[in-house]
């Protein structure tokens, strides 16, 4: 049988499952090409939660459901994470229509907002498109770890990497630009300014397909070059190298979440998009800017509910609720400012955790309900990194856990059958290409015919606001947070070190205390020669990865801004 990986990942791998439930990448799938990553190769090795428990004591699933039923409509909060990205995961929203709902983004939200400002919709730019480029600029993304099925498409291309960390792909790249964290908007403006001086702007594209170019170029030209060099940490000579590599070439940009983890993250991505648009790098073979796309664009959304109130994940306060329902996520590790999250959850009267694995959040829950795995329920996957639509039929079953659909039904919501929902969603916006379902919009090259703004044109940016001061730039360390190859955020095998630059002269495995001015935390260190001297690194999933990240939200996009704060060493 064939199914699709449910995880929060660009690749949306197609998986062959045999009678013994061994998982293998589907050979014939154009993206998967026969291989999976660590998580799916080891999926069965991770111990799952087997029984519902109430305050640590085993209870039946019926008892668990009746507790939820009794409490869910009184001063309650519904919180869904991204542990499984199947579309059916959202059905439980229907059972919590009388609760407040947690929305906003712990992930890509600020960047997506900026992209939507310029293009209307954030469409994907996957391996099939990238394959046709001459040059690929990997800008704050780490495909060797997070998007390994992009690697075949990068073979033979000229590669530029813009990243404050020397990632594996940066080591192999034709050019690695070791940018200052939060410097990307300044580099995008430096590049735009210099490209304009060199008359690299695509006049025909600008004239026919864009709006606001004059304001954009005036704004960019008003930024002093010395300031742009200082804030980005990239000098004109290096910027010139980038321009000479891409001049007249088919160029793909692959953006990751790194450059947008700041208060003005939306402007960062709009500035990069604006640079690409002035060069006419949209809507043509091999030319585009890809990020994490709005995978459900154009699809039916049968699970939308009208909740009483919306609260936002990056600044969530659990403390005022009598009942909190957490599904498919671990806010204690993954939400910024762990001290505030822990304090809030400990004050909430009753917390339910509905998931597959024990984690820092399940430890704080009153009631734990085990979920079914993706092999044990029907679902559908729309990927944010490529155009294929993945079926996820139920392949096996066990006595363990309950599916999201079944839970919702047992909580008294009148539902159509699982298969009807899946059919409705899939048929609303997919079509076949060579016998495989893809999202309709990718029948043509993204933005070939139109942008999705009100004007139908790309809209250049012409202003932004950065509230970091010069002194913020010089003192302390940025705490980069990146993805680890053996974990998927808090799932699977996590990494528990703080990586530090060699220049500090610290010893591997010693403990140091870091402070962000408000909170402190001890970490066990490892030296890492790939780090800039002004950076340290914690991988997503580290139990204390959010002890020092700020309880704050991006200016736009309701997104977490993990790197908006700098940390100091208190003791070592
Ligand atoms: N193995 C594995 N794969 C995953 C995940 C996982 O946990 N593990 N998570 C999935 C999820 S949820 C997501 S959102 C995607 C994310 O996919 P990526 O965006 O590729 O993930 P990161 O590892 O955070 O990579 C971001 C890169 O940005 C760099 N960076 C940090 N700050 C800056 C900056 O200011 N400017 C620039 N230019 N670069 C910066 C970091 O050094 C890092 O190399 O990956 C998905 N894939
Ligand atoms: N410091 C720091 N914080 C981060 C990040 C970072 O890089 N650094 N990354 C951010 C990003 S990009 C993201 S996307 C978020 C992700 O953070 P979360 O949304 O919290 O996701 P996970 O940590 O992957 O939580 C996964 C949980 O989902 C449960 N689960 C898995 N499959 C299913 C299922 O089918 N049903 C149910 N009910 N449960 C299931 C598992 O039990 C697992 O423990 O974290 C963000 N937080
Ligand atoms: S996590 Fe990503 S790379 Fe790994 S199997 Fe799933 S889709 Fe493929
Ligand atoms: Mo994410």
Image: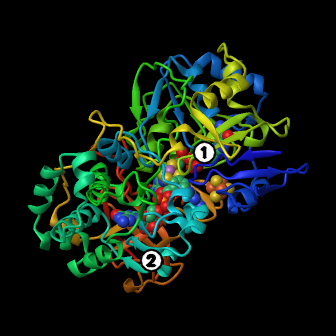
Q: Which mark is residue 166?
A: 2
In the image: residue 331, left or right of residue 33:
left
Secondary structure beneath disc 1? loop
Q: Is residue 325 above or below residue 436?
A: above
Is residue 482 something that shows in the picture?
no
Q: To which residue does mark 1 refer?
A: 83
The numbered mark at residue 305 is none
Residue positioned most to the front: 204
Whether pointer 1 and pointer 2 mark residues with C-beta atoms closer than 8 Å, the reply is no
**Residue 32 visible somewhere in the drawing:** yes
Q: Residue, x 32% and y 67% (percent of image)?
A: 181
Relative to 303, is 180 above or below? below
* Residue 210 at x, y percent in the picture: 25, 46
Quadrant the C terminus occupies: bottom left
Find residue 341 and report its image quarter.
Answer: top left
Residues packed near mark 1 inside 10 Å, few (<14), some (14 to 19) or many (20 plus): many
Instruction: Answer left or right for 565 relative to 420.
Output: left
Mark 1 or mark 2: name the one nearer the start of the chain.
Answer: 1
* Cβ at disc 2 under 8 Å from ligand 1: no
Compared across the picture, whether 182 is left or right of 301 comes to left
Q: How many marks?
A: 2
Could you say where residue 270 lies in the image, as x and y percent from the top left?
Answer: 29, 51
**Looking at the image, which residue is at 66% across and 37% down?**
380
**Disc 1 versus disc 2: distance between alpha carbons?**
28 Å
Residue 506 placed where, x, y %? Answer: 43, 83
């Amino acid at each position: 049988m064939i199914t699709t990986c449910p995880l929060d990942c660009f690749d949306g791998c197609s998986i062959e499952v045999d009678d013994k439930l061994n998982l293998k990448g589907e050979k014939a799938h154009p993206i998967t090409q026969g291989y999976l990553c660590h998580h799916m190769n080891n999926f069965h090795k991770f111990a799952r939660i087997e029984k519902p428990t109430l305050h640590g004591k085993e209870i039946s699933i019926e008892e668990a459901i009746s507790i939820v039923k009794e409490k869910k409509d009184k001063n309650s909060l519904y919180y869904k994470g991204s542990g499984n990205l199947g579309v059916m995961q959202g059905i439980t929203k229907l059972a919590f229509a009388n609760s407040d709902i947690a929305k906003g983004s712990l992930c890509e939200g600020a960047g997506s907002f900026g992209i939507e400002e310029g293009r209307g919709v954030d469409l994907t730019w996957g391996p099939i498109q990238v394959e046709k480029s001459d040059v690929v600029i990997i800008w704050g993304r780490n495909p060797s770890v997070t998007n390994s099925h992009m690697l075949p498409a990068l073979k033979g291309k000229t590669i530029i990497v813009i990243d404050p960390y020397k990632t594996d792909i940066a080591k192999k790249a034709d050019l690695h630009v070791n940018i200052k964290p939060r410097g990307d908007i300044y580099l995008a403006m430096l590049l735009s300014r210099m490209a304009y001086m060199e008359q690299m702007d695509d006049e025909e594209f600008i004239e026919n397909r864009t709006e606001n170019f004059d304001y954009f170029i005036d704004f960019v030209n008003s930024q002093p070059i010395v300031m742009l060099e200082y804030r980005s940490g990239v000098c004109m000579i290096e910027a010139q190298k980038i321009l000479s590599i891409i001049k007249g070439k088919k160029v793909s940009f692959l953006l990751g979440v790194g450059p947008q983890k700041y208060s003005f993250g939306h402007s960062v991505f709009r500035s990069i998009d604006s640079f690409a648009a002035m060069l006419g790098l949209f809507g043509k073979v091999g030319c585009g800017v890809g990020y994490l796309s709005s995978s459900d664009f154009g699809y039916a959304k049968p699970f939308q509910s009208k909740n009483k109130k919306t609260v936002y994940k990056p600044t969530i306060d659990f403390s005022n609720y009598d009942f909190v329902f957490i599904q498919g996520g671990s806010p204690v590790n993954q939400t910024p400012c762990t001290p505030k999250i822990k304090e809030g959850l400990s004050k909430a009267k009753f917390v339910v955790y509905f998931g597959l694995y024990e984690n820092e959040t399940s430890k704080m829950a009153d009631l734990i309900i085990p979920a079914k795995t993706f092999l044990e329920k029907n679902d559908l996957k729309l990927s944010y990194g490529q155009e294929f639509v993945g079926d996820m039929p139920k392949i096996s079953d066990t006595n363990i856990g309950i599916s999201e659909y079944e839970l919702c039904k047992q909580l008294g919501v009148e539902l159509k059958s699982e298969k009807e929902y899946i059919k409705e969603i899939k048929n609303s916006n997919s079509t076949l290409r060579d016998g495989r379902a893809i999202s309709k919009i990718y029948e043509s090259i993204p933005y070939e015919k139109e942008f999705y703004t009100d004007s139908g044109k790309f809209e250049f940016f012409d202003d932004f606001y950065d509230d970091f001061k010069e002194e913020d730039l010089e003192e302390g360390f940025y705490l980069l947070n990146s993805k680890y190859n053996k974990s998927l955020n808090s799932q699977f095998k996590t990494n528990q070190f703080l990586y530090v630059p060699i220049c500090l002269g610290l010893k591997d495995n010693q403990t140091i205390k870091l402070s962000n001015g408000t909170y402190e935390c001890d970490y066990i260190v490892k030296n890492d020669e790939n780090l800039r001297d002004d950076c340290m690194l914690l991988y997503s999933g580290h139990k204390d990865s959010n002890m020092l990240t700020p309880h704050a939200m991006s200016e736009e996009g309701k997104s977490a801004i993990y790197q908006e704060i700098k940390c100091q060493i208190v003791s070592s």
